[in-house]
Amino acid sequence: MTGKYGWRWTALRGVLSRSGQVDFAIESISLSVRLQQSANLENKPTVESVNMTLGQASIISDGMGAVDYILEMIFNVVPNMFRQRIAEAAEYPVSQAIEDELKKLNIEELVEETS
């Protein structure tokens, strides 16, 4: 997974300005989802838990001069702290997206097709 964030700031009515961008990359994402299905097939399956693990992460910053090196060093040297926080922040939205898709399933029809 890769992404970019472009930024720009101006001061003194445009006399001073600076722009740059931060590129990030995450090598891999592992997702474990635990679902629950009632014996009553009229009920939709629900998400019991979501566990996300991110692989190696890195950023490259451009536009802030010496601050670029400091930002890259902090993020790239101490990646575990950032990776875990990103994964934890993403687990709830991922869980909701999966639940939304599960609501579209007709479990009774799926069971009849495989019987």
Image (cartoon, helix red, strand yellow):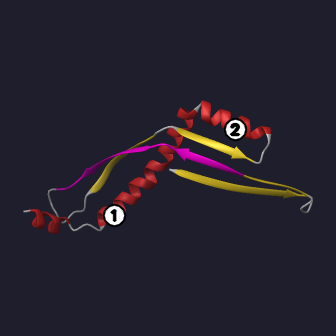
* Residue displayed at 76% across by 39% down: 67
Q: Is residue 113 above or below residue 64?
A: below
Q: Is residue 115 magenta?
A: no
Q: Is residue 47 left or right of residue 15?
A: left
* Residue displayed at 91% across by 63% down: 13
Query: Residue 101's x, y, as percent?
Result: 33, 63
The quarter of the picture where residue 59 lies is top right
Three-letter residue code for mark 2: Leu
Q: Nearer the viewer, residue 103 or 87?
A: 87
Residue at mark 1 to residue at mark 2: CA–CA distance: 38 Å
Crowding near pointer 2: few (<14 within 10 Å), some, many (20+)?
A: some
Which range is magenta? 21-38
Q: Is residue 57 left or right of residue 64?
A: left
Element type where label 1 sits in the image: helix
Q: Is residue 50 above or below residue 66?
A: below
Quarter the C terminus occupies: bottom left
Q: Nearer the viewer, residue 59 or 89?
A: 59
What residue is disc 1 on?
101
Query: Residue 106's x, y, as percent?
Result: 21, 68
Q: Nearer the viewer, residue 113 or 51?
A: 113
Query: Residue 28's x, y, as percent?
Result: 45, 43
